[in-house]
Amino acid sequence: MKELLAHELGMVYQVPKGEPVTALHDVSFELEGGRLLTLLGPSGCGKTTLLNVMAGFLAPTSGGVFLGGEPITGPSQDRGMVFQQGALFEWLTVAENISFGPRMNRVRKGEYNETVDDLLETVGLQGFGDKRVYELSGGMQQRVALARCLANDPDVIFMDEPLGALDALTREKMQGLVLQLWQETGKTVVLVTHSVEEALYLGDRMFVMAPRPGRIEKEYELPFAKIGLEVEPRELKASPEFIETREEVLSMIWDMEEQIMGGSN
Ligand SMILES: Nc1ncnc2c1ncn2[C@@H]1O[C@H](COP(=O)(O)OP(=O)(O)OP(=O)(O)O)[C@@H](O)[C@H]1O
Ligand SMILES: [Mg+2]
């Protein structure tokens, strides 16, 4: 599995008639292949910018990112992205959405049809291949988005608030699916979330980011994702260890929010 490496990343947005915005400052890390990294932090701390740089959608203004030692200079199939919502092709069926990548790559129909059926099963949508996207609930649409991403068999999957638009119950179920997919595929996953609980539950590593300039404030190695594969989510989230870490991270983020509010008043 390929290591993902960020070296002294910086991203400064030039704003017409305004001060430049330093969205990322001196961000460096090494992420071993097969880890599930969560990025947590207040709005505007550069989470999406960091994902977009790693996905190759955005060129950093300094430093670089590397996958398996190769510099990332643009989008590629070895890196997939799942967005919060609305990134599916509405006019295509579920199966057509999932097979979009393979079809673009001219994979033969017989070959990708098999993949689509497997993927539908993997994400719990057996029998939904012929449905249109608008016929599905938000949770089901995110399952399709996951399947579509997996269809390209990427090394790394980036997810920007993939569960952010879902109701609490659906969200909890989908968290289980993310953990299960991570375990079954062995892929590297980098997931952005606003939810402290979600970041702790899913991340086997977590970066808490801070704004102005956007940077990694604190890093955690976390045990919960691996335990979460075996223990009931509610039980795990109610355990003393989980609650203790959650409160620590929450107060760190509250302090940040206070500083931000203080700074802008
Ligand atoms: N295209 C752009 N041009 C100018 N400034 C930008 C641009 N994109 C982002 N920014 C600024 O860069 C900073 C980081 O933005 P980014 O979207 O990466 O944050 P985020 O952590 O993903 O926030 P959120 O949690 O709200 O999604 C913010 O101050 C934002 O206003
Ligand atoms: Mg964002």
Image (tube, rainbow, N blue to C red):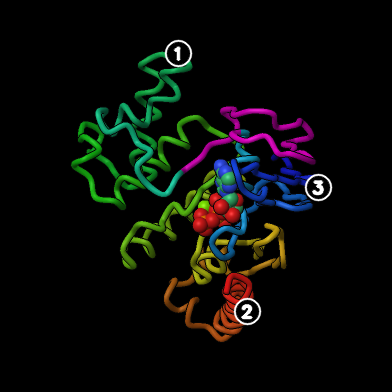
Residue 62 is situated, as x and y percent measured from the top left of the image, at: 78, 40
Q: How many marks?
A: 3
Vertical position of residue 19 compared to residue 213: above or below: above
Residue annotated with mark 2: 255
**Of the residues under marks 2 and 1, which one precedes in the sequence?**
1
The residues tagged by marks 3 and 1 sit, at their Cα atoms, a distance apart of: 38 Å
Give the Cα distance between marks 2 and 1.
Answer: 51 Å
Q: Quadrant of residue 200?
A: bottom right
Amino acid residing under circle 3: Glu
Residue position for label 1: 106
Q: Nearer the viewer, mark 3 or mark 1?
A: 3
Q: Amino acid at mark 2?
A: Asp
Residue at 31% across / 52% down in the picture?
139
User: Is residue 186 visible from the viewing direction of this image?
Assistant: no
Q: Residue at x 60, y 74 (%)?
A: 253
Q: Nearer the viewer, residue 94 or 46?
A: 46
Q: CA distance from mark 2 to mark 3?
A: 26 Å
